[in-house]
Image (cartoon, helix red, strand yellow):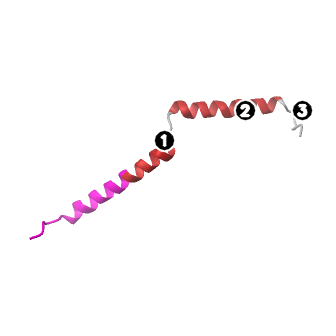
Amino acid sequence: MADVVNFKRFKKRAGREAAAQLADVNRARFGRTKSQRALDDHRVSRANELLDQHKIGGEDAS
């Protein structure tokens, strides 16, 4: 004889497992530490400053 299955619990468990799997994928895609984000921001701002230093008369030299 087969085991009795509560469909409500089964659907909830399946939903939780799907959400956990999606969370793992998102952590791999978007998961960066605060220091990594700060370092990237610093690099971008530094590059922009260096480009601004090469402007002539408020316009691009090129």
Q: Amino acid at mark 3?
A: Ile
Q: Residues within 10 Å of mark 3 (few under 14, many from 20)?
A: few
Q: Are marks 2 and 3 in contact (CB under 8 Å)?
A: no
Kindly identify the residue that appears in the image at 32 percent across and 58 percent down.
15
Can you identify the residue that label 1 sits on? 31
Kindly identify the residue that appears in the image at 51 percent across and 44 percent down.
30
Q: Amino acid at mark 1?
A: Gly
Query: Taking 11 as reference, is 29 above or below it?
Result: above
Q: Nearer the viewer, mark 1 or mark 3?
A: 1
Can you identify the residue that label 2 sits on? 47
Q: Amino acid at mark 2?
A: Ala
Q: Indicate which disc, 2 or 3, sits on the residue closer to the N terminus.
A: 2
Of all residues shown, which one is farthest toward the left?
Answer: 1
Q: Is residue 5 left or right of residue 56?
A: left
Q: Indicate which disc, 1 or 3, sits on the residue closer to the N terminus.
A: 1
Q: Spatial distance from mark 1 to mark 3, Cα to Cα?
A: 40 Å
Q: Which residues are magenta?
A: 1-20
Callout 2: SS:
helix
